[in-house]
Amino acid sequence: MELLETQKELALSNPMFVRNHEIRHYAVYFQLAVTMFVFIISFIRPWGKKKAWKV
């Protein structure tokens, strides 16, 4: 981010900046996937007993 603030347009053509930006995007997607997986495991429990909901 410091590079983007100081060099503005030059940062967008800097290969290191572009690569770091891509890695950050992949990290966000990975984090979302892990969060969804944890949600499925914690709350849905596909292997567990099915509970009857009382109304």
Image (cartoon, rainbow, N blue to C red):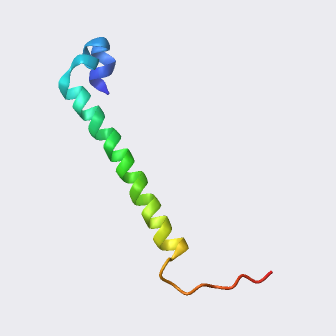
Instruction: Give the vertical position of 38 relative to 24 (above or below).
Output: below
Q: Where is residue 37 in the image (x, y as percent from the top left)?
A: 43, 64
Image quadrant holding the N terminus, namely top left
Which residue lies at the image location 54% right of the left edge and 73% below the top edge?
44
Residue 39, x across and y down, in percent? 49, 65
Q: Where is residue 7 in the image (x, y as percent from the top left)?
A: 27, 14
Left or right: 53 as drawn, with respect to 21: right
Instruction: Classify residue 26 by image quadrant.
Output: top left
| Of 48 and 19, the residue lying toward us | 48
28 relative position to 40: left or right: left
Counting from the top left corner in percent of width and height, residue 41 is at 46, 72
- The residue that appears at 51% across and 77% down in the rendered structure is 45
Tell me the quarter of the picture where residue 23 sits: top left
Q: In which quadrant of the rendered image does the C terminus lie?
A: bottom right
Q: Which residue is drawn at 29% across and 25% down?
A: 2
Q: Is residue 26 above or below residue 12?
A: below
State the residue in front, 40 or 10: 40
At x 43% / y 52%, what residue is drawn? Answer: 32
Q: Is residue 41 above or below residue 51?
A: above
Q: Is residue 28 above or below residue 14?
A: below
* Residue found farthest to the right: 55
